[in-house]
Amino acid sequence: MRIVRSFSTEERESNSYQIANQNIYNFGNKMAVLGSQFMSIGIVLAYAVILAILYYGGSLVIDGQSTIGNLSSFVLYTLTMTISLLALSGTMNEMISAAAVSEKIFDIIDHPVKIRNGSVDASNISGQINISNVTFCYPTKQNVMSLKAISLEINQGEVVAFVGQSGSGKSTIVQLLQRFYDSKLGSILFDNIDIKEYNLQQLHKQIGFVAQEPTLFSGTLKDNITYGVDTFTQEDIDNAMKLANAYDFVTDFSIFPDGLQTIVGERGVKLSGGQKQRIAIARALIKNPKILIFDEATSALDSESEFQVQKAIDGLVQSGQKTIIIIAHRLSTVINSNKIIVVQNGQIVEQGKHQELIEKNGVYKQLIERQLQ
């Protein structure tokens, strides 16, 4: 869901859902026809049984072994029971199918939308971010403060790295910047305008997001790279792949004979971890966002894949054209950042350049020393 919102493709996915619903509707019609045929056959068989009973029972009446009243009663009982069983079988199938899916469907339908959409045009934001006294707790953990009165300024074109132990609040900050949640207290400003005032879809188009575990959709490489982009050229795709360090392997026909038309499989199962991550970076870049967020983008990769992905990130950092936010544990990923933010227990405890933080001999230095052990 967050990937869909991040790329402002709610309408596209809604249309896909409607198409899927139409397919289900068509399938339901076919099942109804088959059910009708089954019912018709059942009724024919039922009447065949009745005729057989009438024939045999009639012969018993003629021979004096039974009465017309007994025969009539037996025929009526048989007819009523047969029709009831046929109707019950169809009803039971429908009830079982409905019960299996209705609970989940109604949970989704009844879930309240708490994020209010704004109206301010976000298409021209510069990448300037101001976080002021933000306090936040997740809706499911109201008694646990994930962020406690954090304040931070990120200038346009800066590279800012967030470091800290797992659960310290780094990814929570990123989720608030994408407005997947609203802060409980404090404010987040983009270009001195409260983030809550911006149109959500436009805002998400200006934020490129690359997660630790990239979500690729079943389809082609091209489909995944251009996901969320309405208009693009082949040059746009090529440029995004080059910036993401993905161009060489995508166009290597010994690896992918179909090139961009290669089917990646469900969740990108046909690609390696490094390849999936670079496709995810290309997908984030093709919409030319003002802000790029890398959330542990290299932590789950082997050394060679990490090198290739880090090379792509370094190229983006050197361009200086975008505000880049990096969440990482590894020293190689954050050492050249303009600003390193150390987060601990939901608070910013240190910030500065790499060497400055080393000289402070504080939390950051401890994190680095643990990594080097």
Image: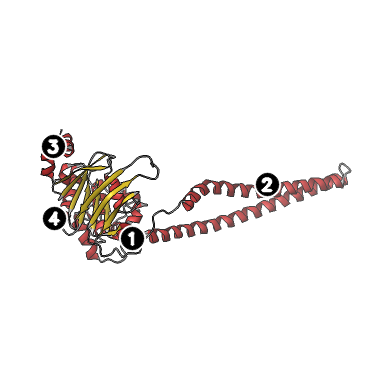
Q: Which residue is mark 3?
A: 361
| Residue 338 image position (x, y, % from top left) | 14, 51
* Foreground residue among 244 and 156: 156
Query: Which residue type carries mark 3?
Result: Asn
Instruction: Give how far across and how far down residue 44 sits, in percent.
Output: 69, 53
Instruction: Name the mark nearer the viewer: 2 or 4.
Output: 4
Mark 2 → mark 3, Cα distance in angstroms: 81 Å
Sequence-wise, the earlier of marks 3 and 4 is 4
Q: CA distance from mark 3 to mark 4?
A: 28 Å
Mark 1 vs 2: CB contact within 8 A:
no
Q: Earlier in the sequence, mark 2 or mark 3?
A: 2
Q: Nearer the viewer, mark 2 or mark 3?
A: 3
Using the numbered discs, state the Cα–Cα distance from disc 2 to disc 4 in whole angstroms: 75 Å
Residue at which label 1 appears? 197
Quadrant hosting residue 298: top left
Query: What amino acid is at disc 4?
Result: Gln
Which residue is the site of mark 4?
318
Real-space Cα distance between discs 1 and 2?
A: 61 Å
- Identify which amino acid the numbered label 2 is placed on: Leu
Q: Of marks 1 and 2, which one's residue comes earlier in the chain?
A: 2
Q: Quadrant of residue 36?
A: bottom right
Task: Name which of mark 3 and mark 1 comes first in the sequence.
Answer: 1
Q: Which residue is mark 2?
A: 85
Point out the tag, 2 or 4, that comes first from the N-terminus.
2
